[in-house]
Image (spheres, coloured by chain):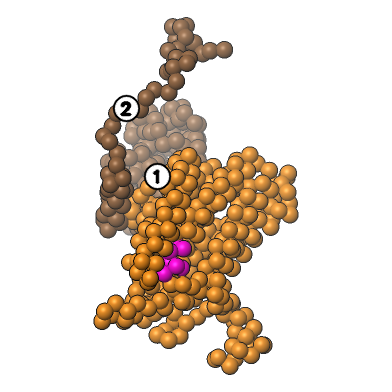
Amino acid sequence: MNDLYNNAIGHWVVVAVASAVLLFVVLTATAYTVWFERVALGRIQRRPGPNRVGPFGLLQLAADGVKLAFKESFVPEKTDKVIYVVAPTIAVAAAFLAWAVIPIGLWYNVQYWIADLNIGVLLIFAVSSLNVYAIVLGGYASNNKYSLLGGLRAAAQLISYEMALGLSLVPTFMIVGSLRLRDIVEYTVHWGPYTGPIPLIILTPIGFVIYLMAAVAETNRAPFDLPEVIGGFLTEYSGLKFVMYYLAEYVNMITVSALATLIFFGGWHLWIVPPVIAFLLKVILFLFLYIWLRGTFPRLRYDMLMRLGWKVLLPLAIVNVIVTGIVLVAVQG
Amino acid sequence: MTEKNQDGADPTPLRLPGEGVPAKPEGPKSSLMADVGALAGGLRTTLHEFFQPTVTTEYPEEKTPRSERYRGRHYLRRYDNGLERCIGCELCAAACPVGCILVIAAENTEEKRVSPGERYAKTYEINMLRCIFCGYCEEACPVQAIVLGPEYELSDTSREKFIYTKEKLLEPLPPDVEARLKAKQ
């Protein structure tokens, strides 16, 4: 395997196959995330959720997908045609690109990744920022005041929370000393008799709280889903273009969950549980948290959202970085 | 341009000009711990609900009980001796607010007696797409010939199928009468 990977052509073959597998796995996971969300939200409201198409409604997404795919590909009269069509593709591309650097532990010594970058987390942030373009351009190109306002709000929100999101992870990098996601997962501590990986949330609990809030805002999910008022930038989108935005939203949700698992919950390490099951379990729990929040909290007003982002999360994140630095210097000398 | 209320006076303004936003009512002092506790309380409530049984009636398999007096599709009734109750008086058609009932009457004769009265309904049609299930036909009928039954699942695949003819509306013959007629043949 290593020989094949180091060979120039073999490397690209491996990458192409890995990308194809990833695309399939993430798309399937997205479909079942939507199913999971609808069922879990239903249960919270004492409804069964979708249960008609296939066993337990598991084929609901196939039915919805076929319905949306066969809708007329409608482009409103006075839109900026090119940008209108390109914007949703940016959203999907940005959502999938992040998965290039996310490693998944398959078995005890086997891990899967497409690119093992030493700046993995930075790449994820860089790519997920592209989502802002998809939203702003989609809102602008729709030539509709609600779309434009929704897009602008979403963009302002994303930019505000991106900083808190980035800074919330800095203490983790300072402790681990690497931005490579695999290094973060494999971070080993020697505490007395115990030597092994630990969930880093123990060392950076405040970072996790900030990350959690910023991540929910970053993916435009309830209770931070302001741009969705009147449909927001989605107002003029239907059919497959709508599917792309929808898909991007859920892929982002899984990305953020996977990232939280890798950075704060020790990735695929969980006692003696097989790594791939441990990883899935943690991601699913995080996704459930997302849905649970959506089922519980009312939407924030726009000024509350901005106040929370700029006046609470950002200063807290900065203080967290400084304090972690001081503690690190004190401990390590 | 201000709207006048019923007495012709100006409506009382909610806020006088220059009054500004009223001060928030004094509530209990909020603290970080109280706020986090409130959020946690909300999460606990929804999690509790998550594990409760669902309350949905899963319709085609499960049905909620209907009232005894539910007004569903119509039936044309018969007497116990098998004769039709309807005497073709058209009072139901006259009472119908949407005009969905068509009755064409014909005379009863000694050889062919369909109802005990002078006349009977040769044609009796109800357009179920027009019917509003008000039950006025039932009230108007002097011989209780037309009644609204409990059946409400009336969907079908074409408009034509919604014109219920007399054959479809009429109750089947009582079993003893049917046996007698068979024996006669």
By secondary structure, the bulk of the magenta-drawn segment is best described as helix
Disc 1: which residue: A298
**Farthest top residue in view:** B8
Residue A170 located within the stretch drawn in magenta: yes
Name the residue: 51% across, 13% down: B3
| Total marks in image | 2
**Three-letter amino acid code of the residue under disc 1:** Pro
Q: Name the quarter where the C terminus of chain A is drawn.
A: bottom left
Q: Is residue A84 found left or right of A25 in the rendered image?
A: right
Disc 2: which residue: B25
Q: Is residue A170 found left or right of B158 in the rendered image?
A: left
Name the residue: 47% across, 16% down: B18
Q: Is residue A171 above or below residue A45?
A: below
Nearer to the camera, B148 or A86? A86
Counting from the top left corner in percent of width and height, residue B171 is at 36, 46
Which mark's residue is nearer the viewer, 2 or 1? 2
Counting from the top left corner in percent of width and height, residue B22 is at 39, 22
**In the rendering, what colour is chain A?**
orange
